Image: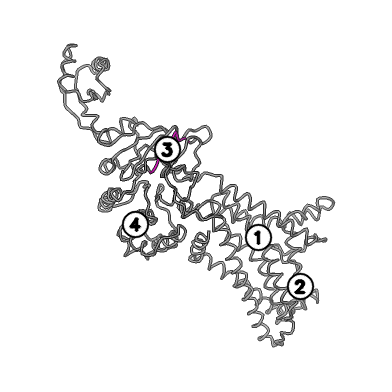
Amino acid sequence: MTDQANIEPQPDAGQDDNIVLRTIGLGKSFGKLKAVSDLNLELRRGEVFGFLGPNGAGKSTTVGMILGLIAPTAGSIELFGHKLNDNRWAALRRVGAIIEEPAFYPYLSGWDNLVMLARAIGGVPRAKITDVLERVNLLDRARDRYSHYSMGMKQRLGIASTLLRDPELIILDEPANGLDPAGTLEVRDLIPQLAHENRAVFLCSHLLHEVELVCDRVAIIKGGIILTCAPVKELLERGPLLQIKVDDPARVAAVLAGLPWIRSVKREDNYLIVDASKESPSRVNKALAEHNIFVSELVGRSISLEGVFLELTGGESGD
Amino acid sequence: MIRLISAELFKLRKRSMTRILLWVLLGMTVLFYLLLFAIVQANVSLPNPSAAEGMQNALGLPNAVPFALNVLSAFGTVLAIILAASAIGSEYNWRTIRVMLTSSESRFKLLSSKLISVVILTLIGMVVGLFGGFIMSLITTAIGGYAFDFTFATDEYLWDQFLQFWRTFSVLVPYMLLGFLFAIAGRSVMPGIALGIGILFLEGFFTFFMILAGGWIARIPDYLLSVNVDAITALNDLPQGFGGGGPMGGGFSSQAPEISHAFIVLAGYSLVFIVLAFYLFQKRDVTG
């Protein structure tokens, strides 16, 4: 058996060094069920990428495929410019991940869990274990048994374990799960820091507010299909939405739907929520007046990532 | 690979279950010796006089090693199944399998390192059990006032015991791999232990009835595990009534298979179990 640990894959000529992860037409079917279809993603160094979706959307399957735990049935994955299957270990050695939830040996202490992982990975100095535990504020409880840790401490140990191999790509699945507000704040501060260290962070989370605060780009997935993939700023600029109150919402909705510059119209009780792109409210008002429709209320509504998410996923929760 | 073995040994060494298994093995050995000693000392009249003589001989120093190996092949098999099933099954129960897979060079190397670690610990357990048996034999010899005569320990004797040590190990291997395979197939510790031990005991019963049935059915057990295990453990030169220390105590088969046949059958089963275990581990997706 050859030791592949020291074989670092060299990017192909003309390959963009900044791209750490690329999925090309990635798909996975479990029998007749298509869990993920034609997934095309690209993740760059220094970027925090949010991966959002409701339950069963295909997030964990995607992460599983990226980490070589689940075999794709279509497409391919490139890590650091090389196909994952070509040199799995050389690529995965540069990836740190928490999948779904931190999982460690309950009878070992936090310290021993990291010692064991360091042995398995190889080439991790003991001082690194101290460093990573210090970074997640767990050094003083490092000798306690993992089974005695609170959920927040388990999460922190999970983050510490991802940093053990000094990864260039970090995959975090719900890293703020079980953390108290102070812990959540720490993680929120830590994630951009990690990205500033020239790493890429792939963040799966249902805390949309947190994602909005830390992510540069997000992809929203539902039913295994990417609904949108764009910079957070761009998604938030889709608005502002207009909230219109009229006497006959059905007629107004039909009129608005016929206007080419209106992107969407959604009814909420007696209100219509109108995505008029970047058009001014006065243009909407004028267009309605031309049809002898006079609004009793027309207000701007700012859009949040949560709003975008709920709109795209049809109101399903992101848990 | 070496670092993966080191990580696996670190985990198993730190796990209290490993130490408990070792203590159980030692406890069983001690208990067995004490029971025999008590029976011999009580001078219980047994229907078969040669059995009583056999018991007395089993406690003697020349039989210390073969007797301990016999105890090991009986109880050690159960403990080896538990150890092997736990080594891989716990990874699924604790969901650490994903962590280990992303921290290992390949699935093949991870599984190999687990298997090698289990083998190392089983061998250590056997040595400790053997040592315990020898100590107990020294104690019963001293208490019973028997002679401390080591003239039996000739080169030939030592070589024979060395071979018997490996023969005993060879009868543990298929059952150990069976537990390992079922833990992988069931993605949990319990299927490994339950089915491994279940087959270990139930096979003995089925063998018994198949031999009773006679004809071609009586030959089927020759291609199963227990009869072949008995054939190998019977090579242990023990007093009458102690031979064939297979898991069910042996002695069902009136006509034991050839030794070479027994080794081939056990090796064949081991190969099938190991290939299936690796195939399942390599091919299956690791999900939630």
How far apart, in angstroms, are the residues tagged by discs 3 and 1? 43 Å
Kindly identify the residue that appears in the image at 58 percent across and 47 percent down: B280
Which one is in front in this view, the residue at disc 4 or the one at disc 1? Answer: 1
Query: Disc 2 marks which residue?
Result: B237
- Left or right? Give the position of B204 relative to A145: right
Q: Which residue is mark 1?
A: B173
Whether tag 4 and tag 2 are in contact, CB under 8 A, the answer is: no
Mark 1 / mark 2, whichever is N-terminal: 1
Both marks 4 and 1 on one chain: no
- Please, what is the three-letter code of the amino acid marked with disc 2? Asp
Label 4, label 1: how far apart the Cα atoms are: 41 Å
**Helix, strand, or loop for circle 1?**
helix
Q: In front: B181, or B110? A: B110
Which residue type carries mark 3? Thr
Q: Which mark is residue A23?
A: 3
Mark 4 and 3 residues: CB-CB less than 8 Å, in contact? no
Disc 3: CA contacts within 10 A as few (<14), some (14-19) or many (>=20): many
* Mark 2: secondary structure: loop
Work out whether B144 lies above or below B183.
Answer: below
